[in-house]
Amino acid sequence: AQSVSQHNHHVILSEAASLELGCNYSYGGTVNLFWYVQYPGQHLQLLLKYFSGDPLVKGIKGFEAEFIKSKFSFNLRKPSVQWSDTAEYFCAVTFNDMRFGAGTRLTVKP
Amino acid sequence: DVKVTQSSRYLVKRTGEKVFLECVQDMDHENMFWYRQDPGLGLRLIYFSYDVKMKEKGDIPEGYSVSREKKERFSLILESASTNQTSMYLCASSPDRGKGTFFGQGTRLTVV
């Protein structure tokens, strides 16, 4: 069955630390890949997306993600996190519809 | 900006009640989705629709039904609410498969 896995349930970092959140999917065909962010009390917002082309995708707020087809992965990165990045992050993959990972809660300590 | 509007932010219903959650989008999107969001489980797809009067089951359709009589409106129905349906419900729409999805603010439903 098609599925999306996020490896970390809760990540706690200090400000200025580097971030990498893992996302893997299981599907052999063509996919589109997304990362969404949900700040406390707010609705989901699109952070970045990959459809084709350069596998390194730059998004908003200094986030980027790299699509590695051979590893079925689309990991999210940020070189230096800020307290305002505290949120829940969801990886999503479209097969015939959009499926989400379980989410990773990021807490950034000031 | 695309706007996806869910009729209620918070709802409290009793076990056994029939519950309607309404969602309207204003961008003529063909595709609409209902998810529920639970801690540690992320977003799980309940139902989706690619056209008026068309619906397909997602991962967890049991206990739910949907209605799409008009393109802009996608309703989620809990036929007989149960406490395990207490959750945050998110409606979403998109213009094309895989091209980005826009979410509503969510409805936090509590079934007592």
Image (cartoon, coloured by chain):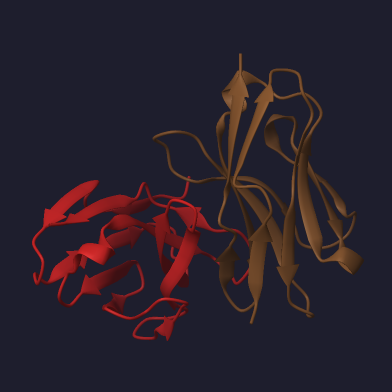
Chain colours: A brown, B red
Residue A95 rendering spot, x and y as whole percentages: 65, 75
What residue do we see at 49% from left, 46% from top? Answer: A44
Q: In which quarter of the image is residue B15?
A: bottom left
What residue do we see at 79% from left, 80% from top? Answer: A28
- Is residue A51 in view from this perspective? yes
Quadrant location of the C terminus of chain A? Answer: top right
Quadrant location of the N terminus of chain A? Answer: bottom right
Residue B107 rendering spot, x and y as whole percentages: 28, 52
Q: How many marks?
A: 0
A48 vs A61: above or below: below
Position of B59 compared to A63: left or right?
left
Q: Quadrant of residue A13?
A: top right
Q: In terms of depth relative to the viewer, which is nearer, B8 or B95? A: B8
Position of B66 compared to B11: left or right?
right
What residue do we see at 57% from left, 68% from top? Answer: A98
> Which residue occupies the extreme top position in the image?
A110
- Is residue A94 in view from this perspective? no
Q: In terms of depth relative to the viewer, which is nearer, B72 or A38? A: A38
B66 vs B90: above or below: below
A76 vs B36: above or below: above
Position of B42 compared to A46: left or right?
left
A45 vs B28: above or below: above
What residue do we see at 12% from left, 57% from top? Answer: B112
Residue A31 rendering spot, x and y as whole percentages: 74, 71
Position of A31 compared to B30: left or right?
right
Residue A67 rendering spot, x and y as whole percentages: 84, 57
